[in-house]
């Protein structure tokens, strides 16, 4: 029984050493994956944000998204992303869960103050 425990502990320690070895794939912590999966607002994201946060989007496609938005105005839906040349439905589906469209309410227009009845134009 003691020998079996010793072998299991040895195997466990070796697997941890291999995972920590140089060149081994890094283990993602929950904090790392949370940062990657933060929602991306298609109407405010810059090129770097799009490249970092979207699957299948390189720098040239990210620039195309930003340029399309500059010329045509904000996206109304996530599906409008397919209107950008080079981006298809598959890319949208791969990224749908991490994309958002944040619509801002138009600025409120201040109401004119009521005319002062004491002031009259004569």
Image (cartoon, helix red, strand yellow):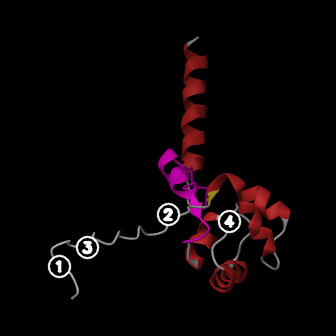
Q: Quadrant of the N terminus?
A: top right
For marks 4 and 1, the one nearer the N-term is 4
- Badge number at residue 76: 4
For marks 3 and 4, the one nearer the N-term is 4
Residue 53, given in percent of the width and then of the height, sits at 61, 64
Q: Are marks 4 and 1 in contact (CB under 8 Å)?
A: no
In the picture, residue 95 is in which quadrant? bottom right
Instruction: Categorize mark 3 by other alpha carbons within 10 Å: few (<14), some (14-19), many (20+).
Output: few
Measured in 3D between alpha carbons, the distance from the residue under mark 1 to the one under mark 2, in whole angstroms, is 36 Å
Q: Nearer the viewer, mark 2 or mark 4?
A: 2
Q: Please determine whether, in this image, residue 41 is positioned above or below residue 35.
A: below
Q: In this view of the protein, which residue sits in the foreground, 92 or 116? A: 116
For marks 2 and 3, the one nearer the N-term is 2
- Badge number at residue 119: 1
Instruction: Categorize mark 1 by other alpha carbons within 10 Å: few (<14), some (14-19), many (20+).
Output: few
Q: Are marks 3 and 1 in contact (CB under 8 Å)?
A: yes
Q: Are marks 2 and 4 in contact (CB under 8 Å)?
A: no
- Residue that badge 2 annotates: 105
Which residue of the protein is positioned furthest toward the bottom in this rendering? 122
Measured in 3D between alpha carbons, the distance from the residue under mark 3 to the one under mark 1, in whole angstroms, is 8 Å
Q: Is residue 113 magenta?
A: no
Measured in 3D between alpha carbons, the distance from the residue under mark 2 to the one under mark 4, in whole angstroms, is 13 Å
- Residue that badge 3 annotates: 115
Q: In this view of the protein, which residue sits in the foreground, 69 or 30? A: 69
Q: Nearer the viewer, mark 2 or mark 3?
A: 3
Q: Which residues are magenta?
A: 23-44
């Amino acid at each position: 029984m003691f020998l079996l425990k010793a072998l299991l502990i040895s195997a466990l320690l070796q697997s941890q050493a291999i995972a920590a070895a140089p060149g081994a794939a890094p283990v993602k912590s929950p904090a790392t994956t949370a940062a990657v999966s933060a929602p991306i607002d298609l109407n405010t994201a810059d090129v770097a944000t799009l490249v970092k946060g979207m699957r299948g989007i390189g720098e040239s496609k990210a620039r195309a998204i930003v340029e399309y938005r500059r010329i045509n105005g904000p996206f109304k839906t996530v599906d409008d992303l397919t209107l950008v040349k080079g981006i298809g439905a598959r890319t949208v589906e791969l990224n749908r869960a991490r994309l958002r469209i944040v619509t801002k309410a138009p600025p409120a227009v201040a109401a004119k103050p009521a005319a002062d009845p004491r002031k009259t134009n004569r």
